[in-house]
Image (cartoon, rainbow, N blue to C red):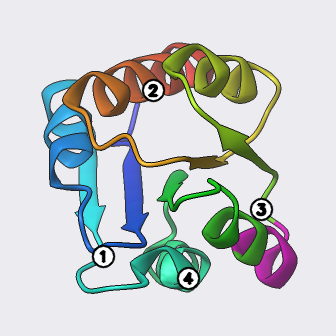
Amino acid sequence: MSEVIVVIGDRLGKGQNVGKGVEAAGGKAIVISGMAADMKLGDMMNEVKADMGISFCGSGGAGAITAQSKYGYPARYGMRSVEEGLTALREGKTVLGFGFNDSEELGRRLTEEFMKIRG
């Protein structure tokens, strides 16, 4: 199986902890730097041919909705828990929008689940 590439965009320019979790699970994390990075999620996913994107903002929607609208990535947004993200992956979503939750656990568990689904 090839390496899982995960792009992370956070409204406040964070996402480094989620990236550590992605890498702990064996994936490659690309954290978009700077403020409003969530709005660049779809563009960066398209550029690097990412497998999954994780967006963070207050509502958990802006970056995910933009990626879905602009590139057609299947998205779920407005999520607040790891479990919601796992369910979205199981339903075939590849762009996940969360309220702020820059945690290693989130990145690790989502990446592990994606790898499990992909086989």
Separation (CA) of disc 4 from disc 3:
14 Å
Is-magenta flag for residue 68? Answer: yes
In this figure, which residue is indicated by the disc labeled 3? 73
Separation (CA) of disc 2 from disc 4:
21 Å
Separation (CA) of disc 1 from disc 2:
18 Å
Residue at 74% from the left image edge and 77% from the top image edge: 66
In the rendered structure, find residue 110 and report the number of the disc placed on it: 2
Name the kind of residue labelled 3 in the image. Answer: Tyr
Badge 4 crowding class, 10 Å Cα cut-off, few under 14, some 14 to 19, many 20 or more, is many
Residues at discs 1 and 4 in contact (Cβ within 8 Å): no
In this figure, which residue is indicated by the disc labeled 4? 39
Residue mark closest to the camera, 3 vs 1 = 1
Left or right, 49 with respect to 37, comes to right
Residue at 54% from the left image edge and 59% from the top image edge: 58
Which span is picked out in magenta? 67-72
Q: Position of residue 29 (x, y in %)?
A: 25, 54
Image height check: is 104 above or below 100?
Answer: above
Separation (CA) of disc 1 from disc 4:
10 Å
Residue mark closest to the camera, 4 vs 3 = 4
Badge 1 crowding class, 10 Å Cα cut-off, few under 14, some 14 to 19, many 20 or more, is many
Residues at discs 3 and 2 in contact (Cβ within 8 Å): no
Secondary structure under badge 1? loop
Residue mark closest to the camera, 2 vs 4 = 4
Badge 3 crowding class, 10 Å Cα cut-off, few under 14, some 14 to 19, many 20 or more, is many
Residue at 62% from the left image edge and 71% from the top image edge: 63
Which callout, 1 or 4, points at the residue further toward the start of the chain? Answer: 1
Which callout, 1 or 2, points at the residue further toward the start of the chain? Answer: 1
Secondary structure under badge 3? loop
Predominant secondary structure in magenta?
helix
In this figure, which residue is indicated by the disc labeled 1? 32
Name the kind of residue labelled 4 in the image. Answer: Met
